[in-house]
């Protein structure tokens, strides 16, 4: 039996365990997928435990995606470019980091908007926002504005949110705002005609932000599609081989059972 861990902080809400267990079951594998809820001070020690022989690797989620990229032994090109990882593979005690969020995001961007936008806005400053920014480049977006409560180099302050969104054709929420709540990071009045929206939050599905957007007739998706897309790619990385459409379907069905009929997957 192999072990995979989900490493994050305050992530008991995660829908990854039922999704990954469905993938294991579809493959006839008796693997386990365990949540490791750790703070920043315990991150390095937790990653070292992944080197054990029975551990296949891990997923990494908020708020550790960027920090974990600096603690593994090697990064692939995608992880280097993103500056963040969401997947770690244990290769005989050596930890390799990759970012399956990026291709999953590229897929969802194409679903929510048929043509690449000229201008996109990403909310957030963590590893998810970095992956979203790279996915937008990969998808052919000409200009991306990052908006963060922290501000800083390369990021507009939150006070500039309205101005940033005004001419945007795509908005990606890469903050945790709305998780297990009815909060939204964006006032509904700012959601204008011609704006498509992708919210990486998936619990609840749909989020209030997505409901507000759809109420205005906009194309909008919650984050379960991204969760699914990164999830089956992570499974492929741990196993070192492709998974079939049947396995992907089983993982999607598990998400629908976990998150409800309104899930976007």
Image (cartoon, rainbow, N blue to C red):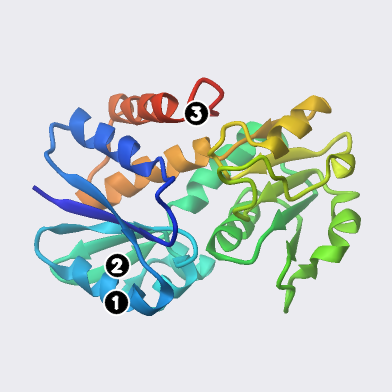
Report helix, strand or loop for mark 1: loop
Q: Nearer the viewer, residue 177 or 226?
A: 177
Q: Sequence order check: which comes first, mark 2 or mark 3?
A: 2
Report helix, strand or loop for mark 2: strand
Q: Which residue is mark 3?
A: 265
Circles 2 and 1: CB atoms closer than 8 Å: yes
Q: Quadrant of residue 210?
A: top right
| Residues at marks 1 and 3, CA–CA distance in whole angstroms | 33 Å
Q: Nearer the viewer, residue 164 or 257?
A: 257
Whether residue 240 is visible, yes or no, is: no
Where is residue 259 drawn, in percent x and y? 47, 30
248 to the left or right of 64 = left
Whether residue 53 is visible, yes or no, is: yes
Q: Residue at x 28, y 45 (%)?
A: 236
| Residues at marks 2 and 3, CA–CA distance in whole angstroms | 28 Å
Q: Which residue is mark 2?
A: 96
Does 238 appear above or below 93? Answer: above
Q: Residue at x 50, y 28 (%)?
A: 265
Does 265 appear above or below 170? Answer: above
Where is residue 159 drawn, in percent x and y? 86, 64
Q: Which residue is mark 1?
A: 73
Where is residue 133 drawn, in percent x and y? 63, 59
Report helix, strand or loop for mark 3: loop
Q: Nearer the viewer, mark 2 or mark 3?
A: 3
| Residues at marks 2 and 1, CA–CA distance in whole angstroms | 6 Å
Q: Nearer the viewer, residue 44 or 117?
A: 44
263 to the left or right of 147 = left
């Amino acid at each position: 039996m192999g072990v995979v861990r989900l490493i994050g902080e305050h992530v008991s809400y995660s829908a990854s365990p039922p999704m990954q267990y469905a993938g294991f079951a579809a493959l006839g594998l008796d693997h386990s997928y365990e949540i490791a809820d750790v703070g920043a001070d315990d991150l390095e020690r937790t990653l070292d435990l992944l080197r054990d022989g029975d551990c296949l690797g891990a997923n990494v989620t908020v708020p550790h995606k960027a920090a974990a990229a600096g603690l593994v032994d090697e990064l692939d090109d995608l992880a280097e470019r993103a500056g963040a990882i969401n997947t770690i593979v244990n290769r005989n005690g050596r930890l390799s980091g990759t970012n399956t969020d990026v291709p999953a995001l590229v897929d969802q961007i194409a679903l929510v908007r048929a043509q690449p936008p000229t201008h996109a806005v990403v909310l957030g400053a963590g590893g998810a926002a970095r992956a979203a920014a790279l996915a937008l480049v990969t998808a052919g977006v000409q200009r991306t504005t990052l908006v963060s409560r922290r501000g800083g180099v390369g990021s507009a302050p939150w006070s500039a949110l309205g101005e940033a969104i005004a001419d945007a054709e795509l908005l990606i929420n890469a903050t945790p705002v709305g998780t297990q709540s009815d909060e939204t990071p964006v006032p509904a009045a700012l959601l204008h005609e011609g704006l498509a929206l992708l919210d990486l939050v998936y619990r609840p599905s749909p989020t209030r932000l997505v409901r507000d957007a759809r109420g205005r007739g906009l194309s909008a998706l919650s984050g379960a599609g991204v969760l699914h897309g990164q999830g089956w790619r992570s499974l492929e990385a741990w196993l070192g081989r492709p998974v079939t459409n049947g396995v992907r379907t089983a993982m999607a069905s598990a998400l629908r059972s976990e998150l409800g009929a309104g899930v976007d997957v």
